[in-house]
Amino acid sequence: MSAEEETRARWEQELEAAKQRMREGGGKAGLARPEQVAGKTGLEVMQAMLAGEIPYPHITETLDFGLVEVGHGLAVFQGTPQLKHYNPLGSVHGGWFATLLDSALGCAVHTTLPAGRGYTTAELGVNIVRAATLKSGPLRAIGKVIHSGRQLATAEARIVGPDDKLYAHATTTCLVFEAR
């Protein structure tokens, strides 16, 4: 088995394990209730989502991707392009890339926030450098925080394949605010 095939198999196992943990914890698509996130840091909220204790966003089902890993200043999502994600030119639509990247970027920022703080994307810059197709297999968006302050946070993310080829990269600026 080649290194690429081993990585692909490991990635698929890691995504399935994350989905299984969420299901076993009772997780499903939806919106978290205020009492489910009250008093939790952003990292604790993301960890609760991975544990299935709070719902995960519907968009992950719509575009067939999922959260695989979180850490302080880090969020990793994985998706496999499908025919329903294609544009009229025969490759994966740029919106699929942008959404996957925005999710990794925003959630990475979220992991750095103290309890009672929220964020929203103020700016998103996306660069697609390689077309994705059905043959691409699983792709990972790896988001990392560059700066997390009281009012602004910045992050960068890359979408890579199991062969470590770069498909897209992005940066974001997020507005940080007091959550209600």
Image: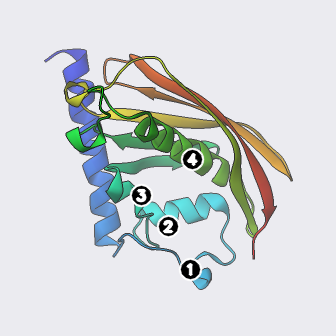
Query: Looking at the image, which is closer to me, 125 or 109?
Result: 125
Residue to which mark 2 is pinned:
48
Which of marks 1 and 2 precedes in the sequence? 1
User: Which residue corresponds to the image point at 84% horizontal and 47% vertical from the top-left?
Assistant: 149
Which of marks 3 and 2 precedes in the sequence? 2
Give left or right: position of 95 versus 170. left
Q: Measure how far apart labels 4 and 1 are at the Cα level.
A: 20 Å
Callout count:
4
User: Which residue corresponds to the image point at 58% horizontal and 50% vertical from the top-left?
Assistant: 107
Which of marks 1 and 3 precedes in the sequence? 1
User: Which residue corresponds to the image point at 41% horizontal and 40% vertical from the top-left?
Assistant: 96
Residue to which mark 4 is pinned:
71
Please tell me how crowded label 2 is: few (under 14), some (14-19), or many (20+) other residues with Cα within 10 Å.
many
Residue to which mark 3 is pinned:
59
Residue, far bottom: 35
Circle 1: residue type: Gln
Please tell me how crowded label 1 is: few (under 14), some (14-19), or many (20+) other residues with Cα within 10 Å.
some
Residue, far front: 88
Q: Secondary structure at mark 2?
A: helix
Q: Measure how far apart labels 2 and 1 are at the Cα level.
A: 9 Å
- The image quadrant where one finds the N terminus is top left
Which colour style is shown? rainbow
Give left or right: position of 98 versus 60. right
Give left or right: position of 80 versus 104. left
Residue to which mark 1 is pinned:
36
In terms of image quadrants, where is residue 89?
Answer: top left
Q: Secondary structure at mark 4?
A: strand
Q: Measure how far apart labels 2 and 3 are at the Cα level.
A: 18 Å
Circle 2: residue type: Ala
Residue 110's disc number: none
Tags 2 and 1 in contact by the CB under 8 Å rule? yes
